[in-house]
Image: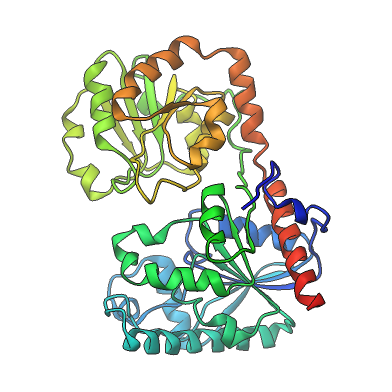
Amino acid sequence: MELVADGIKEAEVRYNDSLEGRDIVIIGLQPWYYEIGSNCKNIATYFAKNNNRVLYVDLPINRKTFLSKNKKAGIAMHCEVIKTKKDEIRQLESNMWELFPTSVIESINFLPSSSIFTAINYLNNKRFAKNIKDATRKLGFKNIILFNDNDIYNGYFLKELLQPSLYIYYFRDFLQGYDYWKKHTTVLEPKLIAKADLVVANSTYYAEYCSGYNPNSHYIGQGCKLDLFNPESSAPIPDDVRHIEKSVIGYVGALDSVRLDLKILELIARSHPEWNIILVGPEDDVFLNSSLHQINNIHFLGRKSIDLLPDYIRTFDVCINPQLQNIITRGNYPLKIDEYLAMGKPVVATRTKAMKLFEAHTFLADSPEDYPALITKALNEYNQHMRQEGIDFANSHTWENSMKALFSSINATLSTKTSI
């Protein structure tokens, strides 16, 4: 697939990079009521700001979750809506609504890939589609654009069931690489990509992957909300890092053993005991039970609210992203790199396909053994010119630019469909 610097095919440049007055339905894997931010929430907000009406559809509740006695607050609220059949549509702002699907879907991931799985998934999609149809009818939505944020199961048959004017599949995570998803998604996702009217991705690697199944696949870049990440802020140093001596090597984000290499962290800590490694973020079970907790110069600080993250990054002398090199990390857009660079920090990270975009502004490691030397280089050679270039580069990754590329791709596709 031919890519150009602004993230869209050359043939698309002539198309309008704005989209107004449309009715847009968004489905995805993250309900609006989840507290953490997401690409999908940001995209929904920008659609609405651009004078479109938006229905953000929460993930339907499956039977296992519905019957569970231990429910998180948001899911418990959703289940109450299912029981009462009241207030399933809630207005978020002047032209954006949230839908709590009231149909309970069957739990099917445990099933083998077979005609039974397909039949039950179709039944689930029919229930889901009915909820969406009822909501769009109440809101007066017409000729909807359906935007599917990586929801392979629940969105698989919606093109046929809802008959949208445009079906968009947004590819931003390689779910096929996860044990939970791989059994069915390795078969279903390529087929879903192929039948979508338009596929958009937030990394060039994912766009190229999708183009193998659907030629109308486009890289739209990644939007970043970097307002909080101000390198000139004079906010106080957090209390739990005041006592930690320099040099500080830091990481902010989920400590997920599927993505991160624990050996890299151990290697850095043991090869340079004079350095302190600060890890800010929630740990999975592998991290929680790892021997890293017995290494004196590694400090686990736990989950912090997003508004505090810049204060921690400010204390780092070098920021790291010690990823594994695997099918999941290969094309995944590393948003934290933008956050690190926006704070004016030198960055050492594992080389992946997605990191090629950042190659000129980071120190990239081809193996775990490269990390200590590259961190030393970053400590000694990172200068004001490199710092400012990194800040400027990170701040070029705006949601405005990403949405313009998305709007241009939508308009190009709508124009093609209209002319047929």
Nearer the observer, 390 or 210: 210
Q: Is residue 130 left or right of residue 352?
A: right
Q: Is residue 285 left or right of residue 417?
A: left
Nearer the observer, 134 or 223: 223
Nearer the observer, 308 or 407: 407
Looking at the picture, does residue 161 appear above or below residue 402?
below
- Taking the spot 30% from the left edge, 81% from the top edge, the residue there is 67
Give percent across and percent down for residue 24: 68, 72
Give percent across and percent down for residue 69: 27, 75
Q: Is residue 224 left or right of residue 263?
A: right
- Taking the spot 51% from the left edge, 31% from the top edge, the residue there is 340
Q: How many marks?
A: 0
Residue at the farthest top position: 380
- Taking the spot 24% from the left edge, 17% from the top edge, the residue there is 271
Quadrant of the image containing the C terminus: bottom right
Residue 83 seen in the figure: no
Looking at the picture, does residue 182 appear above or below residue 161?
above
Give percent across and percent down for residue 278: 34, 28
- Taking the spot 28% from the left edge, 30% from the top edge, the residue there is 265
Looking at the picture, does residue 243 appear above or below residue 112?
above
Colouring chosen for the image of the structure: rainbow
Residue 11 seen in the figure: yes
Q: Is residue 125 left or right of residue 200?
A: left
Give percent across and percent down for residue 299: 28, 29
- Quarter of the rendering containing residue 99: bottom right
- Quarter of the rendering containing residue 41: bottom right
